[in-house]
Image (tube, rainbow, N blue to C red):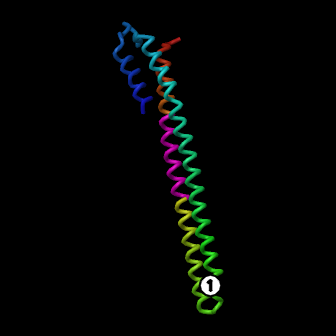
Amino acid sequence: MEVLKLIDEIEDIVESGTSVPFSGKVMVDKFEILEILKEIRIKLPDEIKQAAWIKDERQRILAEAQKDADTLLKETEYRLEGLVDQDEITKKANSRAEEIITKAQSNAKEIRIGALEYADSLMEETQENLKELIQLINENRKELRGPN
């Protein structure tokens, strides 16, 4: 992540700055810090766009899973209608149709659950990254401002 690298740069600048005696303050190049903060502001929306993409991707995966399940159900219904109403064939067909429907529903559920878990984990990771970035930026801003 480029934003984290930029924050590391700010930390390096603060750590290598000239210490002010008898205080926890450090003198740094104001313009250098402000330039890096400007870059962070530019890059941060990319992280937010990534989170939106994950949300859209989750919706696409869910829609695709539902479409596949619907297709399987329609195919099963079509096969059922095409079978002859003879006793043995009908029993076998009904049994097979139930298996197919159960399997299709199970597959659709697995795909849906997997997609939800994947999307949730990606969103959680992005959320944690954003939390860390915001916390770090707030801490750096406090340090830059010094005690008021």
Element at badge 1?
A: loop
Q: Position of residue 107 (x, y in %)?
A: 53, 66
Q: Residue furthest left?
A: 16
Q: Residue furthest bottom?
A: 87
The segment highlighted magenta reads 112-130
Find residue 61 and report its image quarter: bottom right
Q: Residue at x 42, y 33 (%)?
A: 1
Q: Nearer the viewer, residue 41 or 29?
A: 41
Judged left or right of residue 145, residue 27 is: left
Q: Height in image: 75 above or below 130?
A: below
Q: Position of residue 35 (x, y in %)?
A: 46, 17
Find residue 4 and report its image quarter: top left
Q: Residue at x 36, y 10 (%)?
A: 19
- What residue would you read off at disc 1? 83
In terms of secondary structure, what is the magenta stretch mainly? helix
Q: Residue at x 50, y 18 (%)?
A: 142
60 magenta-colored: no
Query: Hey, what amino acid is under mark 1?
Result: Leu
Q: Nearer the viewer, residue 123 or 137?
A: 123
Q: Residue furthest top?
A: 21
Q: Position of residue 84 (x, y in %)?
A: 63, 88
Q: Residue at x 47, y 27 (%)?
A: 136
124 magenta-colored: yes
Find residue 31 and report its image quarter: top left
Disc 1 packing (10 Å; few <14; some 14–19; many ≥20) = few
Q: Position of residue 53 (x, y in %)?
A: 54, 42
Could you tell me how many numbered marks the image carries? 1
